[in-house]
Structure formats: structure tokens, C-alpha cells
Amino acid sequence: MNLSLYALTVLIWGTTWIAIKWQLGVTPPPVSIAWRFWIAALVLFALLRIMRRPIWPARAAWPYLAAQGLALFCVNFLCFYYAEQVVPSGLVAVVFSTAPLLNSINGRLFMGRKLQPSVIVGALLGLIGIACLFEQQMAGHAGDLVMWRGLAIAFLGTMCFSAGNLLSSRMQGMGLHPLVTNGWAMLIGASVLTVGSLAAGLPFALEPEPRYLGALLYLAIPGSVIGFTAYLTLVGRIGPERAAYCTVLFPIVALAVSTVFEGYQWSILAVVGLVLVVAGNLVAFDLTRRMFGARVTKRPA
């Protein structure tokens, strides 16, 4: 089950990049993100109703839901949409692949989790591998101040992603299912984005192009409803440190898509990077057997 959730997350999030690219254009990014999570939240609530599951969380969960909505489904995406406009996507991928390290460090600082050396070593190997894969895009940008500002914003987005992971882990420890927490957190994030967009005078009309609308539906349902539910369920099962390692793997799927649709050219260094990513994955998961064979013991709420 864990392996299936992991593979599903990597495959879906490895392909959402092209849908996000198709959304950049007429509709402002905050508006596109708001529509994405309005649709996703409504689908999640409909699923909960069909499955006859409780929809209203306990009162104690609301501060965590509000924080997750702001961090994971609002600021996180605003940061990465901005970063993608000023920074090569390869560099953004390198920054985002620090998520396993951030989850390990933040889990230790804020939740008292024990640092797992295998996860840290595996994440470092994966980060080096991603850097090798995107070395051509990284070359020649050392003196670009706009790029460095974009990288800082991408790092802020990754911090928000990590915070959302830990908040989800905390709420699952309280007995709340990710379908419920995702639905409310997405609704909160979409509401904040909507109010902010209207206050800023941004047009809220959608671009009436089939490619844009198709991308919106793909990001809302596979990318958000399925992807975030699978990923955050994995966070509850194996812990945020190991679950976040898929953020190192999904750029590899994106590269495979880029090879087909954009003519990405593989070099010897890129192949070395791919090998390092796979090696890091094996190290982080203790050769996969132990990770996928047992659940992480949850702390009491």
C-alpha cells in the first residue's frame, strides 16, 4: 500500500509541472491557484458525503487547519509560481528537493522526532543528483540578483510545504483523515487567495482556452485531490521525512516528459545524477524493505 501511494504521488506530481506551465499567461497565478483549490475542495467534500464520512473536524483541529491552508495551499504555491517566472525550472527543482532535509530538521525542532541518518544521507545524495541533472540550467546565473531572489522565494515555498507536511502529520495523529483535513485546508487557502485577488483588483475570469481549462482540471483533481491525499496519507504512514523524498524523484518524471515533448538532452552528468537520485532513494528507505513493511508509530495527540 505504501509503495502504491508513493508511486502514485511521484507519477502525478512529476507531470503537473507541464499543466502549471500551460496555466501561465492571461489568468493571474493567484486566481488560477484559487480556482484549482475551490474545485479540489468541492470534490473532496462530495467524496466525503458519498463515503458517509464525518466532514466537520474537532474544534482543536481548526488552528492546524488554518495554518495548513495558508502554508500548503496558499503561500507555497504563490512562491513557486513567482519563482518559475524568474528562475530556470531546474534550479527551482533543486530547491524543492531539500524538502526531506527540511522535514527532518523541522520535525526534530517542532515535534521532537528523532533524526534518521539514513534519510539525511539519502536526501543529500538525491540533492546532488538533482543538481547534476540540472547543471546546464544552473550554469551562468551566479551573478543574477533576480535569480537569487527567486531562489529565496522558492526556499520559502519549500519551508511552507514542509510546515504543511508536519501539520498534516499532527492532525493524523489526532485521528483526522487527510480527505477531511485537505478539504478544509484547501477551502481556507482558496478563500484567502480569492479575497486577496479581489482586493488587488485581479480579474477573476478564467481563460476560455481548452488547454488552460484542461490543465486546471488536471491540477485540481489528479494533482490536488488524488496527489495530496496520496502524499499526506503517506506522511501519516511512514513519516514526513521519508514521504518527502518523492520531491526528489518527481523531477525525474518531469525530465522524462520533457525528453518527449521538449527535447531535453541527456548528458553523461545527467545520467550520473539519475544514478545518485536512485542511490539516495535506496539509502533513505533502508533498501525499501523495512520502510514499506511497517508503519511509523504515531505519537499521541
Image (cartoon, rainbow, N blue to C red):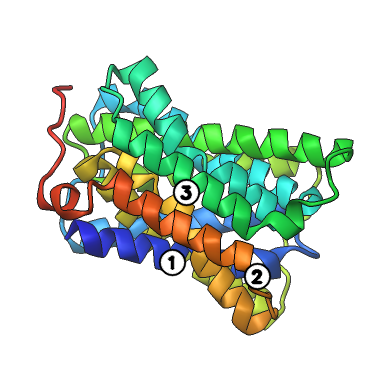
Q: Quadrant for residue 235, please give it.
A: top left
State whether residue 179 is above or below residue 106: below
Query: Which sits earlier in the primary sequence, circle 1 or circle 2?
Result: 1
Q: Are marks 1 and 3 in contact (CB under 8 Å)?
A: no
Q: Which residue is mark 2?
A: 267
How far, Cα to Cα, is label 3 from label 2? 18 Å
Query: Which sits earlier in the primary sequence, circle 3 or circle 2?
Result: 3
Q: Position of residue 201 (x, y in %)?
A: 81, 44
Look at 66% across and 43% down and name the residue there: 78
Q: Pointer 1: residues within 10 angstroms few (<14), some, or many (20+)? A: many
Q: Is residue 178 left or right of residue 33?
A: left
Query: Which sits earlier in the primary sequence, circle 1 or circle 3?
Result: 1
Q: Is residue 266 left or right of residue 176?
A: right
Identify which amino acid the numbered label 1 is placed on: Ile
Identify which amino acid the numbered label 2 is placed on: Ser
Look at 15% across and 31% down and name the residue there: 298
Q: Compare residues 217 and 144 and report the one nearer the observer.
A: 144
Q: Which residue is mark 3?
A: 126
Identify which amino acid the numbered label 3 is placed on: Gly
Q: Quadrant for residue 66, please give it.
A: top left
Q: Is residue 59 left or right of residue 124?
A: left
Look at 56% across and 53% down and name the residue there: 130
